[in-house]
Image: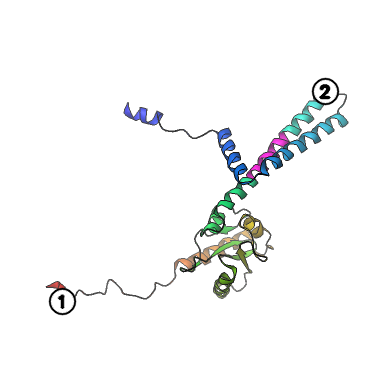
Amino acid sequence: MARTKDTSSAPKEPGRLKQMWQVFQMTRRYDSTAPWLMLLGFLAPVALGLALAIWLSSDNWFTMILWIVAGVLAGLLLAMVILGRRAERAAYSQIEGQPGAVGAVLRSGLRGGWVGNEMPVAVNGKTQDAVYRAVGRGGVVLIGEGDAFRVERMLKDEERKVTRVLPNVPIRLLTVGHGEDSVELHRLAAALRKSKRSLTKPEVLAVSNRLNSLQSSLPIPKGIDPMKVRAQRGKMR
């Protein structure tokens, strides 16, 4: 009986409408233009549906109602799409500039067959600058996170490593930031999709597996081998 009470008293997840309202509230807090864009996205299809209803079906009330309902449904769908895009942008704005922000985008924001590594392939322990890697139809993309001047050298080093292993695969270098030649965090996924396609889907998988296998088989840094350490005689006594 106690187990039944524990299960019934467990907090329930919020419903779909409540989740959407929470997303809207969060988005509005960080993006004041989002409500107005959603309103415009809703009203435009409704106005279009009403205009088509009057123009094409002025003598048929049933068809007019269908046009208006279609406009309302299209408006709701467009408003939800706008909310999703603006919510994603607002979420990225909260983590922008923090170490690991690029990894968060590569983990959850990639589409179109792109495969990204949540963990960086190179890190500067002092400055926290990092290089991430993504593989897709456009080839290999190396993404720098941190100061553009410092990250440039790290990107070039990783580019040479990839070129030695995959000389025929195109490589693109990107830096996340607000500079003239940089890409803003919320535009990173779109920038990857704009890459010119040069690989097939099986080739993307093969290239990704090849690079991941090399990354996981890096040599262990030289140091003291604990299996070869002998205890000192004084301590043994």
Q: Amino acid at mark 2?
A: Trp
Which is nearer the eye, 180 or 85?
180
Q: How many marks?
A: 2
Q: Name the residue rendered at 56%, 71% in the picture.
A: 150
Q: Quadrant of the N terminus?
A: top left
Question: Hey, which quadrant is residue 42 in on the image?
Answer: top right
User: Based on the displayed image, in which of its 4 quarters is residue 38 positioned?
Assistant: top right
Residue drawn where x is 59% and y is 39% of the image: 25
Of the two numbered discs 2 and 1 in the rendering, the one whose residue sits closer to the viewer: 1
Residue drawn where x is 65% and y is 44% of the image: 32
Sequence order check: which comes first, mark 2 or mark 1? 2
Contact between marks 2 and 1 (CB within 8 A): the answer is: no
Residue 233's tag is 1
Assign a secondary structure to mark 1.
helix
Whether 89 is drawn above or below 221: the answer is above
How far is disc 2 from disc 1 in space, using C-alphas? 101 Å
Is residue 16 positioned above or below 177 on the image? above
Q: Is residue 80 magenta?
A: yes
Q: Position of residue 191 (x, y in %)?
A: 66, 59
53 sits left or right of 199 in the view: right
10 Å crowding of disc 2: few (<14), some (14-19), many (20+): few
Report the magenta residues as a range: 73-84
Rendering coords of residue 40 (x, y %): 74, 39
Residue at the spot 42% in from the left edge and 72% down from the top edge: 219
Residue bearing the label numbered 2: 61
Classify mark 2: helix, strand or loop: helix
For the residue carrying disc 1, how many other residues have a C-alpha within 10 Å: few (<14), some (14-19), or many (20+)? few
Quick check: 57 left or right of 24? right
Amino acid residing under circle 1? Arg
Nearer to the camera, 219 or 166? 219
**Which percent across, then down, holds residue 50?**
81, 31
Question: Does 110 lie within the magenta span?
Answer: no
